[in-house]
Amino acid sequence: MIIAFLIATLAGIALFLIAEGVGRWWLRTHSRYAVWPPSMRQEIRLARDVFPELEPRVRFEINTDGERGQEVPRDTSGLFRVLATGGSAVECFALDQPTSWPAGVERLLNSRESLQALDARAVHVGNIAHSGVGAAELDLIFERVLPQYERLDLILIMVGASDVYHWIEEGAPPGRPAAVVPEPLLFAAYPKQTFGWKPGALALAEIARRLRRRWLRPLEVKERKTLLVNNLFLLGRQEAEQIHQSLPLGDVLAESVAQDGRERRRAAGKVEPLLDYVLIPQAFQRPGRPVSTEAGTDPNLRGRVRREKQNGTGEQDLPDEMLARNLSQRAIS
């Protein structure tokens, strides 16, 4: 009996090791790069006492291609496909899915007039933006993600603020831009993913998570997210070892962002030579001041910051609705 038990135990261990090894091989050879876990569904319930003007319920749903947005139709004939990407201003993490400006662009471009102008049957807008993504990180994302698309018709890019954030986070060094965020922190799924021997770090566990998301589409609910973010911000400032009162000129940072933009255009051209792109200016300006675009981009992208009064509380930016309208006009022009 003891010998039979030992043989069965050893056989079980061997089968587990074989299955884990096959699982790791399969994930590394068949995984696609994805900024967000494909088929993920989250519902974020915001703290109304922190940001009462935001929607209390935020849906964050990722399609099987790893984009925040609806599933891509199986029949792609006549489909005009748009990819939106950048940092938090594109991610729209605290906005409900239909409220985010990429979703607004999709609705506007699916109007009868827009479809006629685009000569398209339908328009799909997928959003792969993520908070903290700067120009250099976006270059790496494009290098990994764009070859996975059979076709894209338009890319919407809004990037730049995170470069400043990371640069300041590293002490605003005058002679260099911030270091690039490592690949494992940029992608939720990628072929080079590392595994361990703890239960949650096994390849078999990762396969189980992916199958569960793909087949069951479970809804993950997160409570009072903004209150946590607010408390972490206050705690971080209280424990800061240094608080800078001034910053050096960001010439090196600006040149780095411009160079990354040139690399981004080359990466897009390798995937689809006729692919159009729109670089959305991301800047802090006074009302009515012109917003400059990156050197070398289309001069027609120059615009103005518009501000309107809401509820008598003073001037507030209304970016999402206006941006969606402006970009939809840009796409069909």
Image: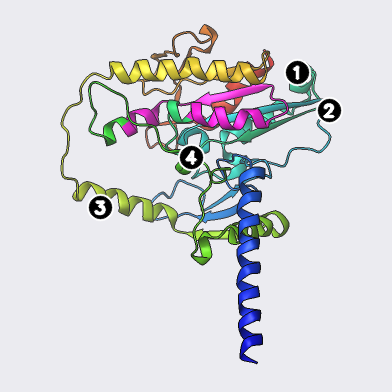
Mark positioned earlier in the residue sequence (3 or 1): 1
Using the image, tell me which numbered label, if any, was put on residue 291.
none
The magenta segment = 138-166
For the residue pair 119 and 266, the one nearer the viewer reads as 266
Question: Given the image, on which type of amino acid does mark 1 rest?
Answer: Leu
Quadrant of the rendered image containing residue 214: bottom right
Looking at the image, is mark 1 or mark 4 nearer the viewer? 4
Tell me the SS state at disc 3.
helix
Looking at the image, is mark 2 or mark 3 nearer the viewer? 2
Mark positioned earlier in the residue sequence (4 or 2): 2
Q: Label 2 vs label 3: CA separation? A: 52 Å
Q: Quadrant of the C terminus?
A: top right
Quadrant of the rendered image containing residue 210: bottom right
Q: Label 1 vs label 4: CA separation? A: 33 Å
Q: Is residue 40 visible?
A: no
Horizontal and vertical percent position of residue 86: 50, 30
Give the residue pinned by disc 3: 235
Give the residue pinned by disc 1: 118
Give the residue pinned by disc 4: 186
Q: How many C-alpha atoms fall within 10 Å of the one at disc 1: few (<14), some, or many (≥20)? A: some
Q: Label 4 vs label 2: CA separation? A: 32 Å
Mark positioned earlier in the residue sequence (4 or 3): 4
| Residue that appears at 49% across and 38% down | 130
Question: Given the image, on which type of amino acid does mark 3 rest?
Answer: Leu
Using the image, tell me which numbered label, if any, was put on residue 77.
2
